[in-house]
Image (spheres, helix red, strand yellow):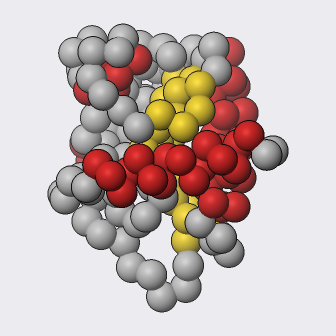
Amino acid sequence: MSYDSNNIFAKILRDEAPAFKVYETDQALAFMDVMPQVPGHTLVIPKDSAEGLLDVDPIILGGTICAVQTVAEAVKQAFEAPGIMIAQLNGPAAGQTVFHMHFHIMPRFEGLEFKLHARDMEDFAVLEAHAGRIRACLTHA
């Protein structure tokens, strides 16, 4: 499969599609998942035209991982989560639904079940509130 420059994440990077952004660097962008599996579900994508982990430029991947660490700490703090789950899916067989390399950051609590992946759109007011909570933790880091 070749990279589709019209995928939703590529459009977000070009500001052609809206996103509830929480953090940005020269190499990565973090924003709220509009179909979250748990409250606070955040995505981090590289600013690279890569479908998956094996396609991304290693230098950009390094910068993306730094963004994942930074955002994961803020998500953990913003949602007072005892744990954080980081997921990165490659290919349809692994559950990838948007073919632009990305990391999922999800606050985890014992007994809190996941919603199904990529099923239900969250209310935009909720997503903006969650993004604000995470951004507030980033400014105090």
Q: How many marks?
A: 0
Q: Nearer the viewer, residue 57 or 116?
A: 116
Q: Is residue 94 visible?
A: no
Please give left or right for residue 121 compared with residue 55 in the image. Answer: left
Q: Is residue 10 left or right of residue 27?
A: left
Q: Say whether residue 11 is visible.
A: yes
Residue placed at 36% from the left, 72% from the top? 114
Residue 50 position by quadrant: top left
Q: Residue 102's spot in the image, x, y percent?
A: 45, 35
Of residue 85 and residue 57, the one placed in the foreground of this image is 85
Image check: 100 left or right of 120? right
Expressed as whole percent of the image width and height from the top left, the position of residue 45 reads 49, 30
Name which residue lies at 79% across and 46% down.
Answer: 140
Residue at image location 47% in from the left, 34% down from the top? 21
- Would residue 120 appear left or right of 98 to someone viewing this image? left
Q: Quadrant of the N terminus?
A: top left
- Above or below residue 69? Residue 56 is above
The x, y position of residue 98, in whole percent, is 28, 35
Q: Position of residue 106 (x, y in %)?
A: 51, 59
Q: Nearer the viewer, residue 49 or 74?
A: 74
Give the position of the C terminus as an image quadrant. Answer: top right
Q: Residue furthest bottom?
A: 111
Identity of the residue drawn at 30% across and 69% down:
115
23 to 128, vertically: above or below? above
